[in-house]
Amino acid sequence: MNQRLSPGQRVWLAAGVFTLVGWALQWWRLHSLAATMDQGILFQVLWNGLSGHPFESTLSSQLSTNVVHGGELPAPGYHRLGQHFTPSLVPWITLVALLGK
């Protein structure tokens, strides 16, 4: 009953273990108190994208030149694309929408 795994099975096993460890570490990181401002901005952009307001972020608005140097108040509808051009977030918004259902 001593069965060896084929090379293909070993690759799939390693990929599965790697994925599970990565998910566990990410879950721990998200639920620890070590969350960063950047994580908050990206979560807000994803959430707003799911709500029909893509690339909007009040947290990014707080860091904008208009607020910091111009004395304006942070705007709820501030588009993050003005600070960081990140259209690569669109597939992530779609993935989060698919995983959330």
Image (spheres, grey):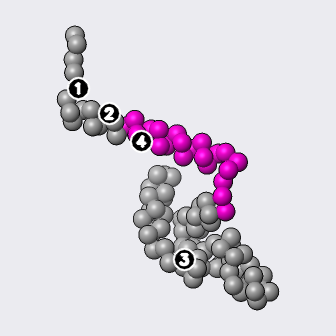
**From this viewpoint, is residue 51 visible?**
no
User: In which image quadrant can residue 4 be found?
Assistant: top left
Q: Amino acid at mark 1?
A: Leu
Q: Earlier in the sequence, mark 3 or mark 1?
A: 1
For mark 2, what is the residue? 13
Q: Position of residue 6 (x, y in %)?
A: 19, 29
Q: Residue furthest right?
A: 71
Q: Residues within 10 Å of mark 3 (few under 14, many from 20)?
A: few
Q: CA distance from mark 4 to mark 1?
A: 19 Å
Name the residue rendered at 48%, 58% in the picture.
Answer: 97
For mark 1, what is the residue? 5
Q: Earlier in the sequence, mark 4 or mark 1?
A: 1
Q: CA distance from mark 2 to mark 3?
A: 38 Å
Establish if 29 lies above or below 69: above
- The range drawn in magenta is 16-37
Left or right of 53 in this view: 95: left
Q: Quadrant of the N terminus?
A: top left
Residue 84, numbered label: 3
